[in-house]
């Protein structure tokens, strides 16, 4: 094992500190299986699976209900035991339509496990890959996990580096940080399992510097593995994004608009490493994940193990008007309704207070708000109160350059945004618009409240058309 670099980081980015309603440090609790689950047959990376059950069928927890082995995809599983009551098309959270399977819980908990053996060390890469695929663990990340089973456009022989993201820096995403402490054994063995599926490759783990206990344990447990590299990183947002993580750890660039497999890397996060262990050693399909339930409007804040397909409504407890966000609060994925289900790539459900009145709305962003500029002194130890407030209306650009300073991709966000809204698409391309990883920091820091990310997304869409 090699320990590389001391407190590596990247140019730009932002340290968020603590927000009110964060579940930081809360132990993971299991939510009881819900009465009903809504399972989209498109989960995480890959194409939509085809339903192999029909309305009226009884299914067990962990039973495969959809698969499309001929396409790049991963099987989808029932996450509770009960009756399939509906199969229909619905709008998918990430755009377009998806077939969903609704299952009603019959109160019994019968599991259908994946056929496996606890001594994973004796398995071939193909055997490990097959279990990961059958257990639904391969539809992870931006390009899936490569196996011999069409789970990714890449194949295992093209991969040289497995990159572990153990440096979660998104505000409120505390579940995976907590998993590192509570499921450390599974995490360590999960790393070995994923490497075994990919063959003789190097593993680079980026770990936030403030996790001293995990760091020390990893040094002891991985000491004799010369393929394992441990990197201590600063917890600056968006360190965990594929492009930023790979650049910091390996000094390699992911092609603009591309993905990590194109340069021989696979990036996985802590939840997926743990799910790999549970699949291969315990035979447990990927039917539940840790979810941070958080936000200034949430009454019951915490980190919970939640069955996939659980409607967001079941996790929310608020007593004030609020906006519900699935996943990143900065990139703001607002579900159309609260029937939206938890999926393999939903690390958090956040409810922010809906701000109705502003104090001096034109005075610009102030401290103690979910907003930041260099013109306001940050007050240490005071938790920010995140609301949906914009803290004032959009105003003309004042050329302060803050958006340029924070951009982790060293882009010129205001120039790209201006080119996008003025239909100067060639200029936007020349400014490398597709290198934008949509971290939203430029819009977050802008004192003029210009919706830079929305404008950049608009430009990308127009160019793709
Ligand atoms: S959203 Fe794009 S342009 Fe804005 S800071 Fe992030 S990477 Fe840079
Ligand atoms: S942060 Fe806002 S005001 Fe400042 S240069 Fe960028 S777009 Fe202009």
Image (cartoon, rainbow, N blue to C red):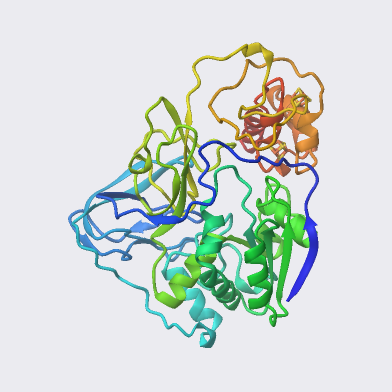
Tell which residue pokes out farthest to the bottom in this image: 122
Q: Position of residue 226 (x, y in %)?
A: 73, 80
Closer-to-camera residue (328/366): 366
Q: Position of residue 119 (x, y in %)?
A: 48, 85
Ligand 2 resides in the quarter of the picture at top right
**Which residue is located at x 48 percent, y 27 percent?**
353
Can residue 163 be seen here? The reply is no
Q: Is residue 408 above or below residue 76?
A: above
**Which residue is located at x 49 percent, y 80 percent?**
127
Closer-to-camera residue (55/325): 325
Q: Is residue 360 above or below residue 109?
A: above
Q: Position of residue 339 (x, y in %)?
A: 34, 39
Q: Position of residue 261 (x, y in %)?
A: 66, 61
Q: Which quadrant is home to the C terminus?
A: top right
Q: Which quadrant is home to the N terminus?
A: bottom right
Say left or right for 47 vs 125. left
Say left or right for 357 vs 103. right
Say left or right for 88 vs 147. left
Q: Is residue 151 above or below residue 462?
A: below
């Amino acid at each position: 094992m090699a320990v590389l670099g001391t407190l590596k980081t990247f140019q730009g980015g932002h340290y968020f500190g603590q927000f009110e309603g964060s579940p930081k440090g809360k132990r993971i609790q299991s939510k009881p299986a819900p009465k009903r689950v809504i399972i989209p047959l498109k989960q995480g990376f890959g194409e939509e699976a085809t339903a192999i059950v029909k309305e009226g069928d009884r299914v067990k927890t962990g039973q495969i209900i959809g698969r499309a082995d001929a396409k790049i995809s991963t099987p989808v599983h029932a996450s509770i035991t009960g009756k399939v009551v509906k199969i229909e098309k619905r709008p998918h959270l990430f755009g377009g339509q998806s077939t969903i399977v609704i299952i009603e819980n019959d109160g019994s908990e019968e599991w259908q496990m994946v056929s496996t053996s606890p001594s994973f060390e004796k398995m071939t890469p193909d055997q490990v890959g097959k279990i990961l695929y059958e257990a639904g663990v391969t539809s992870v990340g931006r390009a899936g996990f490569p196996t011999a089973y069409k789970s990714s456009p890449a194949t295992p022989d093209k991969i040289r580096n497995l990159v572990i993201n153990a440096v979660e820096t998104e505000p409120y995403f505390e579940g995976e940080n907590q998993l590192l402490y509570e499921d450390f054994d599974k995490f360590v063995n999960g790393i070995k399992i994923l490497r075994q599926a990919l063959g003789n490759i190097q593993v680079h783990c980026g770990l936030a510097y403030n996790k001293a206990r995990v760091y020390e344990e990893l040094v002891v447990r991985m000491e004799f593995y010369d393929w394992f590299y441990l990197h201590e990183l600063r917890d600056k947002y968006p360190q965990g994004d594929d492009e930023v993580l790979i650049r910091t750890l390996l000094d390699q660039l992911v092609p603009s608009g591309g993905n990590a497999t194109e340069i021989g890397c696979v990036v996985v996060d802590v939840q997926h490493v743990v799910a790999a262990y549970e699949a291969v050693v315990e035979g447990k399909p990927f039917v539940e994940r840790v979810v941070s339930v958080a936000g200034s409007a949430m009454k019951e804040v915490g980190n919970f193990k939640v069955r996939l397909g659980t409607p967001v409504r079941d996790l929310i407890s608020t007593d004030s008007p609020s906006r519900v966000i699935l996943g990143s609060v900065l990139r703001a994925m607002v579900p159309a309704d609260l029937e939206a289900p938890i999926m393999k790539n939903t690390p958090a459900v956040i409810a922010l207070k809906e701000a109705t009145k502003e104090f001096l709305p034109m005075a610009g962003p102030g401290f103690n708000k979910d907003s930041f500029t260099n013109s306001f002194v940050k007050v240490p130890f005071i938790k920010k109160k995140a609301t949906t407030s914009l803290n004032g209306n959009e105003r003309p650009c004042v050329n302060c350059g803050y958006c340029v300073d924070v951009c982790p991709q060293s882009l010129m966000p205001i120039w790209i945004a201006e080119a996008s809204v003025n239909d100067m698409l060639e200029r936007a391309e020349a400014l490398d618009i597709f290198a934008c990883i949509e971290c939203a920091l430029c819009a977050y820091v802008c004192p003029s409240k210009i919706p830079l990310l929305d404008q950049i997304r608009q430009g990308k869409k127009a160019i793709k058309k």
